Amino acid sequence: MTYLQDSMRFWSNMGVDGFRLDAVTMLLEEGRSSYFNNPGNPGIVKAFKDVVDQYDNRYLICEVSEGRELYLDVCTAFAYGVQQPLIAGIKKGVVAPEVISFLEDPRRDLMPLALQSHDAYVGDRLTNQFGVNGDANYKVAAAASILVSATPFGYYGEEIGMSNGGTYNDPGIRSPMSWSGEKPAAGFSGAHPYRDPAINFATMNVDAQTGDPSSILEFYRAVYSVRKAHPVLATGTFKLLSKAGDPVLAFSRTDANETVVVAINVSDTVQSVTVDTGVKNGRFGQAFKAPDVAAPPEVSSDKTGQATINLAPKTVQVLVKAR
């Protein structure tokens, strides 16, 4: 343990921003039949956290395939298990009950809602899950993941719609990054890579999507720009404004400076949703909207704080009111 802690100090002194602890469910083995989520595991994680806490602005996150609630006192943990119903609900055009239950958990900000991973148990590449013509679903899933999470995470290639390399397994979802459409390695290398490139590298790559406002890459950049411009999305008080089965996922975050209302239409039809903004007689400006949405520049709340938001199919609005 001392060796590992010293290693963390070394890299922290070098300036790394944080650490991801892999497979913490299997840290402590007590015989061949007792190796999963043993009671001593959180104590080991805490020993790592004690090192990280000695530094400013460092982050520690755990990969927990099952039982993440066992570790939340000592580590943030990916909300694996929530991404599947989120994706399934988006395909059906509704907010899944598992997503609502997750968002109702007061510890939600300790559990980033990541959509993909290098491990196949989390799911296939999003492009493979949503299909060839699934960009609209892909984008609303991305928006939900990024805007809901206090600290969002993305798996490389997710931001360009990379497919798997031809198989749905661990090696298949670990293809080299598709920087360009050039053979043999999609701009990753001049040589043939150890793993085959993504099946769709010829079109879904960084070069092809940069500057294209309709691309997945530019959509990701726009969503992250909104987050950067409005820190309340990371640290503000969270209020859920939707229920299971709704066609719109809506929530607000509030701090001393701003109130932000996020509305994501996961359905295939135009939706009009009335939400409690918590701001009486307020005027909310549009901080983000997809390029093809004819959304009004402002949305107003009434004397009770209610505001009506009109959304085109599969679109996102982020409404901001300065305090």
Image (cartoon, rainbow, N blue to C red):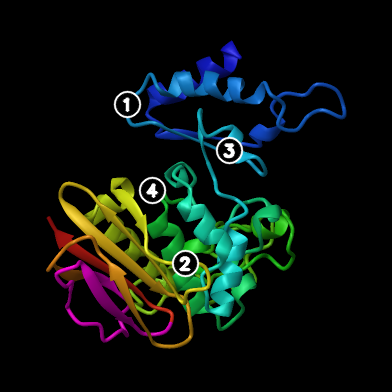
Q: Is residue 250 visible?
A: yes
Q: Nearer the viewer, mark 1 or mark 4?
A: 4
**Is 42 a magenta residue?**
no
* Residue 243 circle label: 2
Image quadrant for the N terminus? top right
Q: Which residues are magenta?
A: 287-313
Packing grade of label 4 (10 A; few <14, some 14-19, many >=20) is: many
Q: CA distance from mark 4 to mark 2?
A: 20 Å
Separation of residues labelled 2 and 3 (CA atoms): 23 Å
Q: Are marks 3 and 1 in contact (CB under 8 Å)?
A: no
Which residue is label 1 attached to?
Answer: 56
Q: Which residue is mark 3?
A: 69
> Residue 191, position in %: x, y?
62, 57
The answer to whether mark 4 and mark 3 are in CB contact below 8 A is no
Q: Amino acid at mark 4?
A: Ala
Looking at the image, is 101 positioned above or below residue 282? above
Query: If you read the primary sequence from the N terminus, does the residue marked by circle 4 or circle 2 appear first?
Result: 4
Q: CA distance from mark 4 to mark 3?
A: 17 Å
Q: Tell me the element at label 4.
A: loop
Q: Nearer the viewer, mark 3 or mark 1?
A: 3
- Residue at (56, 56) in percent of width and height: 189
Query: Residue 150, which numbered label?
Result: 4
